[in-house]
Amino acid sequence: MARARMRILVLSRVTTHDQLAGEMGEDGLSRLALRGDGWYERIVEAHEEHHVTLGILRAAVRDLGIVARFVESMDGVRTARYDAVVTAGGDGTVLHASHHVDDTPMLGVRSSRHSAGYLTGADAADVHEKLAALVQGTLASTVLWRMSVYIGERLAHDKVLNEALFSHPNPAVTTRYVLRVNGRREDQMSSGVWVGPAAGSTAAMRAAGGRVLASSSRNLQWVVREPIHRPKTRLELVSGLVRPTQQIVIVNRWQPARLYLDGPHLTIAVRPSQRISMRISDRPLTLLGWSKRKARRRG
C-alpha cells in the first residue's frame, strides 16, 4: 500500500511593506519613500526577499510531493491534522505559530536576511534540503521547553516559548510588586520583570543582564529590569534560576499592570493584588532543523 503523502501547514508572515500599505495606503508609502533615510528601501528589500523565499518553498513542496496548506493566520487552524508546521518569516512568525502548536513539530524558515532568525532552522538556500529530510524522516529535531503562566489559579497560557514581561502599562511608570522565588520574598520597584525558559535566554533577558541557558535546560530564569534600590537597602532577588519543580510568583501591588507574552501581541491585564505564577510547562515544543550552535543570527 502506498505511503500517505506528508501534510504540512505553512504560516507565512505578512510583510512590513504590506502592513504599512494597509495602514497608510500607497500615498503614505510614497511619502515614506521620499524621506530618503533608507528605511523604505530596506522594507521593500525584505518584502521582495520574503516572496522569493516563499516561491522557493512552494516549488520545493511541489517537487517533493508534499500536501501543503498556506495561511497568513493561525485562527481556527487545527495543527494536529498536519505532520509538521512550517513558518516563513522570522522569529516572530515562529513564536506566533508556536502558541497554536501542541505536539506537531515545527520548522522555521527565515524568509529575509532582515528578519531575526534565531529560532529558524532553514532559509532560502537550504529549505529544499530541509524539507526533503523532513519527508525522509531524517531531519534533526530539538525539544525546547515552554513556560506556563497562571493568573491566580487560572491557567492563562501554557505555551510561552521566549519570555513573559510583567510591567506597568505605561513604560514611564514604576512597577510595584512582591516577588516570591525559591522560598524567599522581596518587595520591589523596577521597570518590570522578565521571566522565561531557555529559548528566550539569548534575547531580552540576555540584554537585561541574564544568563544564556543550554537549550535543553528545564529551568526558568528571571531578571528584574532597572531595579530601584531604596536608601540603606539593596534588592537581592534581581535575577536567578528556578528548577522545574519550583515556580516564580509575582504579586501585583495597587496599580494596574500588564503581562506581555512572547512579544507585544499577546497581553493580559493584571489587576491590583492579583498573583501571577510561572512554572515550566508540560507542553514542550519540537523544533526541526535547529540547534543553538547553528541558529541563524538575529537580524
Image (spheres, grey):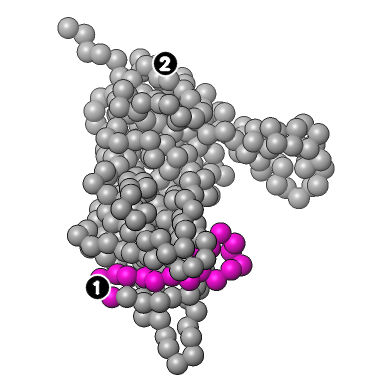
Residue name at image x 48 percent, y 71 percent: 176
Q: Is residue 20 above or below residue 211?
A: above
x and y, in percent, of residue 276 in the image: 37, 59
Q: Is residue 120 above or below residue 182?
A: above
Q: Which mark is residue 183?
A: 1
x and y, in percent, of residue 40 in the image: 72, 42
Type of amino acid under label 1 = Gly
Report the span colored magenta: 167-184
x and y, in percent, of residue 184 in the image: 28, 75
Q: Which quadrant: the N terminus?
A: top left
Is residue 157 at least partly visible in the picture?
A: yes
Residue name at image x 30 percent, y 60 percent: 220
Is residue 212 at least partly visible in the picture?
A: no
Q: Which residue is mark 2?
A: 62
Judge depth for marks 2 and 1 and give the one in front.
1
> 24 or 121: which is nearer to us?
24
x and y, in percent, of residue 221 in the image: 33, 63
Asked which quadrant contains residue 248, the reply is bottom left
| SS of the residue under disc 2 | helix
| SS of the residue under disc 1 | loop
The residue carrying pointer 1 sits among few (fewer than 14), some (14 to 19) or many (20 or more) residues within 10 Å by Cα, namely few
